[in-house]
Image: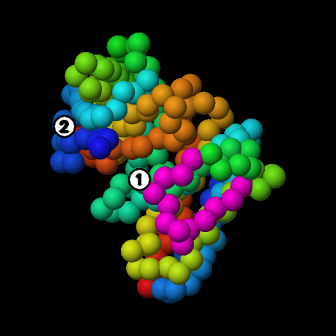
Amino acid sequence: SQKIEQNSEALNIQEGKTATLTCNYTNYSPAYLQWYRQDPGRGPVFLLLIRENEKEKRKERLKVTFDTTLKQSLFHITASQPADSATYLCAPMDTGRRALTFGSGTRLQVQP
Amino acid sequence: DSGVTQTPKHLITATGQRVTLRCSPRSGDLSVYWYQQSLDQGLQFLIQYYNGEERAKGNILERFSAQQFPDLHSELNLSSLELGDSALYFCASSVGTLREYGYTFGSGTRLTVV
């Protein structure tokens, strides 16, 4: 069956460091993958979309990589700030699917 | 404000009851998606509508139903409620294909069944 794995343990890092979050997927052949940020009790917010032919995508301090051979996406936040503390969700998407399936998310805590 | 409006924000009701959750998508978005988020399950896709028609179904219980109206707002009906239905219910909309665009989520309705 299809599976999306994100580290369930919280990631704690110091302000200013680079945070790296991992999304592994099984039994998917995603044509693209999306990342979202979710704060407690609020709806997720769309951050980035990367396609299978795009190995890397950047937006301000965010960088996403997509390795279809390893079946993995990495999400990086450089120069992290306490305001980046949130849960980050990934959603790989197969061609032909009409709705996103989300991983359970990784909680990031940036310490000042 | 994301542009997706969900009402009510909070709902407390008893087991066996029926409730209706409402969602108005962002202006111009034709697709509406409903998700359930509970502590132990993460975000679970329930159902999608596009311009009034059902397009995709996820793990939606038979006790749950939804519809999208001509003005594109959507309602999720939950009946014969059980304690386990307590969760955050999110509505999301999208402007076009998910190949190009992400979802815009509303702020959710927190349902508590007692």
Quick one: SS at disc 2? Answer: strand
What subunit carries mark 1? B
Q: Residues within 10 Å of mark 1 (few under 14, many from 20)?
A: many
Q: Which residues are magenta?
A: B56-68
Measuring from the top left, give residue B105's x and y in whole percent. 55, 47
Q: Nearer the viewer, residue A97 or A40?
A: A97
Residue B43's disc number: 1
Instruction: Pick the quarter of the image with the C terminus of chain A.
Output: top left
- Against A70, is A41 above or below? below
Label 1 and label 2: CA atoms lie apart by 26 Å
What subunit carries mark 2? A
Measuring from the top left, give residue A92's x and y in whole percent. 39, 33
Instruction: Pick the quarter of the image with the N terminus of chain A.
Output: top left
Measuring from the top left, give residue B33's x and y in whole percent. 58, 49
Measuring from the top left, give residue A5's x and y in whole percent. 25, 41
Q: Residue at x 25, y 18 (%)?
A: A69
- Against B59, is A30 above or below? above
Residue B23 seen anywhere in this rendered image of the structure? yes
Q: Residue at x 54, y 26 (%)?
A: B99
- The three-letter code of the residue at mark 1 reads Leu
Residue B64 magenta-highlighted: yes
Residue A13's disc number: 2
